Amino acid sequence: MTALRIIVSGVVQGVGYRQWLRERALLAGVTGWARNRSDGTVEALLVGAPDTLEALVAEARKGPRGARVTDIERREASATDHAGPNFSIAPSL
């Protein structure tokens, strides 16, 4: 298992991005969380197989209808940062 933390920039709040990402993650068998940040970005922790995470990040670059992703910052994370067997919507930061 690999863990990846991403920060998605652009028009990603107010368009259902976190819920959309949660649905995609659950379908892919990825655990983790997504939350809105006060700077207008969405942050997510993704935990899963490396190939699955790469495919999910590629989807995240498109996002749901109404979103306009301009950038995805990514860095490795620790799977222990995640405390749950599912993908959840975390409280905003």
Image: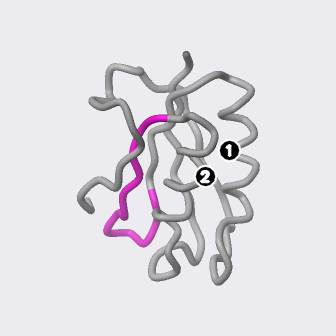
* Residue 63 in picture, x, y percent from top left: 66, 66
Q: Amino acid at mark 1?
A: Leu
**Badge 1, how many Cα within 10 Å: few under 14, some, many 20+?**
some
Distance CA(mark 2)–CA(mark 1): 7 Å
As drawn, 22 above or below 3: below
Q: Which mark is residue 56?
A: 1
* Residue 38 in picture, x, y percent from top left: 31, 69
Q: How is the image coloured?
A: one colour
Closer to us: 21 or 13: 21
Task: Name which residue lies at 63% across and 39% down.
Answer: 28
What's the magenta region? 31-42
What residue did someone put label 2 on? 24
- Whether residue 75 appears in magenta in the rendering, the answer is no
Residue 23 figure quarter: bottom right
Mark 2 or mark 1, earlier in chain? 2
Q: Is residue 48 left or right of residue 88?
A: right
Q: Is residue 33 left or right of residue 53?
A: left
**In contact (CB < 8 Å): disc 2 and disc 1:** yes
Q: Which mark is residue 31?
A: none
